[in-house]
Amino acid sequence: MSDMIDLTGDGGVVKTILKHAKADAIAPSKDLPLVDVHYEGTLAETGEIFDTTREDNTVFSFEVGKGSVIQAWDIALRTMKVGEVAKVTCKPEYAYGSMGSPPDIPPDATLMFEVELVACKPRKGSSLSSVSEERARLEELKKQRELAAAAKEEEKKKREEAKAAAAARIQAKLESKKGQGKGKGKAK
């Protein structure tokens, strides 16, 4: 059941799927960027555990793609689905690299994480339905603005046509009055 995937093309981040998610499981996305994970981090060279959420059964939450975690996690979590468990091996340049590692992790260490994607959620203050509803509302507003602009343009066209018709009637009246006045003038 081990599917090794080189996520960066240079061996910097390699994911091995330990447990596949269900086929219909959700994945992190623009609408669901917040993830909850269980993980256990070990040093590849020694197998020493340096961090875990398993001991106290807590979850670690972060927003994918915001740079709030090591680069390997942003890369790997984008490829996972809820329920999936994977081993993510990352070279130092995709781990702590130049940003400085915690004191118990050598800066040149290759790290391995067993990560389980527990949940994907929308950002705080929104829900998936409210995100969808907001998109629909904005689309509706856009349509209304387009219809209002078309109606305004139609009104403008009608006003111009009415002005032209009124000007033509006035001109016709003036022309007819000029014609009436000829030959009927009073002698002085």
Image (spheres, rainbow, N blue to C red):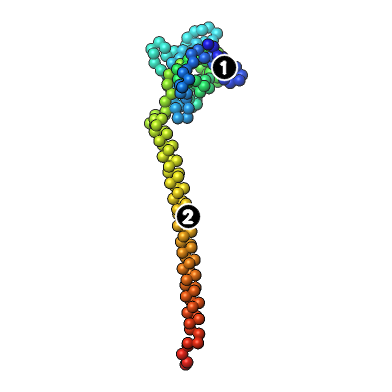
Amino acid type, residue under disc 2 in the picture = Glu
Q: Position of residue 125 (x, y in %)?
A: 38, 31
On the picture, is 135 further left or further right than 3? left
Q: Position of residue 137 (x, y in %)?
A: 41, 39
Q: Nearer the viewer, residue 156 or 50?
A: 156
Q: Nearer the viewer, residue 93 or 9?
A: 9
Looking at the image, how many numbered discs can be counted on the residues? 2
161 lies above or below 172: above
Q: Position of residue 25 (x, y in %)?
A: 45, 21
Q: Which mark is residue 153?
A: 2
Q: Position of residue 37 (x, y in %)?
A: 44, 18
112 lies above or below 143: above
Badge 2 marks a residue whose secondary structure is helix
Amino acid type, residue under disc 1 in the picture = Ile
Badge 1 marks a residue whose secondary structure is strand
Label 2 or label 1, whichever lies nearer to me, is: 2
Q: Which mark is residue 93?
A: none
Identify the residue at horizontal 49%, vertical 66% (top origin).
164
**Residue under numbered circle 1:** 5
N-terminal label among 2 and 1: 1
Can residue 34 be seen from the camera position used here? yes
Label 2, label 1: how far apart the Cα atoms are: 57 Å
Q: Residues within 10 Å of mark 2 (few under 14, many from 20)?
A: few
Identify the residue at horizontal 45%, vertical 44% (top origin).
142
Identify the residue at horizontal 50%, vertical 26% (top origin).
65
